[in-house]
Image (cartoon, rainbow, N blue to C red):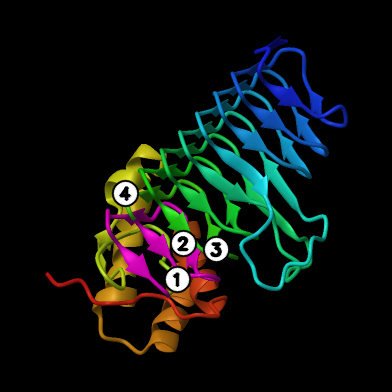
Amino acid sequence: MAIHPTAIIDPDAQVDESCHVGPYCVIGAGVVIGKDNRIGPHTVIEGPTTIGDGNRIGNHCSFGAPPQDLSYRGEPTKLVIGDRNFLGDYVQLSRGSTKTEHQTTTIGNDNFLMAYCHVGHDCCVGNNVIAANALQLAGHVTVEDRVVFGGLVAIHQFARVGRMAMVSGGSVTSLDIPPFCRVGGYGCPVYGLNAIGLERSGVSRDKIKRLREAYKLLFRGGTPLEDALGAIEKDFEDSEEAQHWVAFFRGTKRGVVRDRDPK
């Protein structure tokens, strides 16, 4: 273990001997840190927090601080971070609050969160998510796998961001963002299918072509929503991606952005 002499580690914290802990870090009680993590200077990690293996944590980060929630009264909620994440300078990850069953904020694996990103209490961030500087996720936000965020994006509490969505910089939304789509601007209107993201994620051209057909029906056909979902459920049984649209729309609590493509 390479711990700088100015770092402060609580005796009740568990830090694997393979980790590097930079100058002036503070690691509190109830923190468990796995193998081969590198933690930059001045970072503060409070417990209960669990961090997996192979993460790269920047300077001046704040992990596991109490949730910014007026109803919180000091209960032992949690932050859980997976493996191989890059968490840049000044990233803030809050613990969960007491308003959910699990009372946990979760960060998955292989994510890349650049400087100044904030993940609020009870958020669930999936795997392979890329976020440019200053992404702001309010409490209880769910981000599915392989989402790409531009800088300065703000997502309202309890909203969801669907798998392989691409959100342009400066966007703001209080509604769910549908999977596989490109969105941007105030309210995050849908601008098209994220075909490049799908291709880079290994989705075949035949599947993308099939999904494009479902996209036209759902987002450009002018068909009432439930009629479009019913048609996709019936006519696109061969498309796992199209069926994910159906489940995502039917599972919404806030509503899903469904602006028609302007082209």
Of tags 4 and 1, the one toward the viewer is 4
| Residue 39 shows in this picture | yes
- Residue occupying image coordinates x 45% and y 71%: 176
- Residue occupying image coordinates x 59% and y 18%: 22
Most common secondary structure along the magenta stretch: loop
**In the image, residue 244 lies at what x, y percent?**
51, 64
Sequence order check, earlier mark of 4 and 1: 4
Task: Determine the image quadrant of residue 209.
Answer: bottom left
Q: Secondary structure at mark 4?
A: loop
Residue nearest the observer in this picture, 252 or 76 = 76
Of tags 4 and 2, the one toward the viewer is 4
**In the image, residue 125 lies at what x, y percent?**
56, 51
**In the image, residue 82 lies at what x, y percent?**
66, 37
Give the residues in magenta. Answer: 153-174
Q: Which residue is mark 3?
A: 141
Q: Which residue is mark 2?
A: 161
Sequence order check, earlier mark of 2 and 1: 2
Sequence order check, earlier mark of 3 and 1: 3
Residue 224 forms part of the magenta stretch:
no
Query: Is mark 3 in CB contact (under 8 Å) with mark 2?
Result: yes
